[in-house]
Image: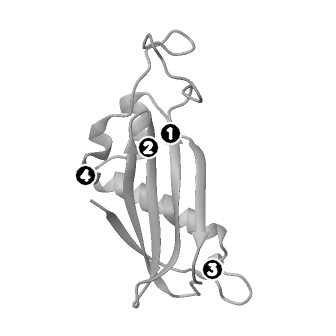
Amino acid sequence: MPFTRTFRVRWVDTDVAGVMHFTNYLRYFEACEEEFYRSVSMTFNDIQRKYGITLPRVATHCSYKTACRFDDTFDVIMQLREASETITWDFQASRQPERRLAAEGYMHRRKPGMEGRESTDGTGQNGSRERTVSPTIVVNMR
């Protein structure tokens, strides 16, 4: 089930021509992810405290389709693609009111210490028990 948030292009997000700078789409994708966690009464800090994990980004991608300009409103739609030792969120930014696709991409997060290896014994690199990403974190996305 997709999660959607509406944003407005701020002056600080634009170039001299009033067009939103391409890097800011990733900022809004991240803001949508943050709002999703808040909607299920969690924050990034809560995830770290409760599950003992951080979720650093290991890959991001964004394709740009059409410009958003100062004061435009746009929806960011976030959809869960994968939730296991990694979490991958797909995003689409659509300019209102015509719902024209402005950008689409993904953010891929991985539990630290899992880069390129699978644990066979359930222990981390320092001998601690590895923790998987809890399905309760993403329960509303399924």
Graded by Cα atoms within 10 Å as few (under 14), some (14 to 19) or many (20 or more), the crowding at tag 4 reads some
- Dot 3 lies on which element? loop
Which badge, 4 or 3, is on the more N-terminal residue? Answer: 3
Do callouts 2 and 3 mark residues in contact (Cβ within 8 Å)? no
Which badge, 2 or 3, is on the more N-terminal residue? Answer: 3
- Number of callouts in the render? 4
Residue located 44% across and 10% down the image: 121
On screen, 138 above or below 115?
below
Residue picked out by circle 1: 55
Residue picked out by circle 4: 140
- Look at the image and tell me in which quarter the N terminus lies: bottom left
* Residue 87 marker: 2
Q: What amino acid type is highlighted by mark number 4?
A: Asn
Q: What amino acid type is highlighted by mark number 1?
A: Leu
Residue located 33% across and 34% down the image: 134
Do callouts 4 and 2 mark residues in contact (Cβ within 8 Å)? no
Which badge, 4 or 2, is on the more N-terminal residue? Answer: 2
Q: Nearer the viewer, mark 2 or mark 1?
A: 2
Q: Position of residue 9 (x, y in %)?
A: 54, 80
Whole-angstrom CA distance, mark 2 to mark 1, is 8 Å
Q: Nearer the viewer, residue 68 or 13?
A: 68
Graded by Cα atoms within 10 Å as few (under 14), some (14 to 19) or many (20 or more), the crowding at tag 1 reads some
Graded by Cα atoms within 10 Å as few (under 14), some (14 to 19) or many (20 or more), the crowding at tag 2 reads some
* Residue 125 marker: none
Q: Position of residue 131 (x, y in %)?
A: 40, 24
Whole-angstrom CA distance, mark 2 to mark 3, is 27 Å
Do callouts 3 and 1 mark residues in contact (Cβ within 8 Å)? no
Do callouts 2 and 1 mark residues in contact (Cβ within 8 Å)? yes
- Dot 2 lies on which element? strand
